[in-house]
Amino acid sequence: MGDSTTVSNDHWQAVLRWKQGHHVFHVLLVSMNTVLDDSMNALVQRDWSRLVSSLNRLTALYDASTSTMKYAADFSKDRYENLIRPSMMPPYLSPGFTGELNTEHKVMVDGVLNLRHCLQAELGTRKQWPADVVEAWTRLSKSQSQNRKHHALVCQKFVDDGASLLQEFYAYKQNAEQNTGEES
């Protein structure tokens, strides 16, 4: 019989998967941002084969990100509710913590949007793009869609109503402000 400080193997596995998955995701984000820069340079230089190659690498990185997400979240809802989620709340982190505060993630999201806008500005509608660029962009778009879909499934798996810590924080703050206003 273990003492009260003994942590079960499945607790360690949940923490390990969560941390390792997010560390790998960060490396993938840095790589995506590098590839996005290369994609923009290829577009500016009108080097279509390099642009296609960059878009294909970006697609592979999105697919790797989705696989990493699956790995990071491969544990029970109970472990998330009682171990992982509390570690993302006060006193460990500020109220309303969200992964959207990750700088590399914001750079990546903005970079993809900027690349799309620049492709449209430079080449017009997709009908006017070189065929291999259209094919590579379509593969990337499908990979992004799968990534977002899987992230939503992970959120649903762990949080029944889908409320993030940030959403909960704002709801709590709004409720507190309304209650303060009623007391005045």
Image (spheres, grey):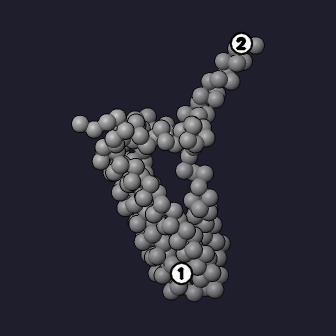
Residue sticking out furthest to the top: 183
**Closer to viewer: mark 1 or mark 2:** 2
Q: Nearer the viewer, residue 129 or 114?
A: 114
Q: Mark 2 Cα within 10 Å, few/some/many (few <14, many 20+)?
A: few
**Residue at left offset 35%, top offset 57%:** 71
At label 1, the amino acid type is Leu
At label 2, the amino acid type is Glu
x, y (%) of residue 7? 34, 42
- The secondary element bearing badge 1 is classed as helix
Residue 184's place in the image compared with 151, above or below, is above
Q: Nearer the viewer, residue 116 or 103?
A: 103
**Residue at left offset 49%, top offset 75%:** 55
Residue 66 in view (yes/no): no
x, y (%) of residue 140? 46, 69
Instruction: Look at the image and tell me in which quarter the N terminus lies.
Output: top left
Where does label 1 land, which residue? Answer: 51
- Check residue 139 in the rendering and tell me which mark sits there, or answer none: none
Q: Is residue 142 left or right of residue 104?
A: left
Instruction: Look at the image and tell me in which quarter the C terminus lies.
Output: top right
**Residue at left offset 30%, top offset 47%:** 9
- Check residue 183 in the rendering and tell me which mark sits there, or answer none: 2
Q: Mark 1 Cα within 10 Å, few/some/many (few <14, many 20+)?
A: many
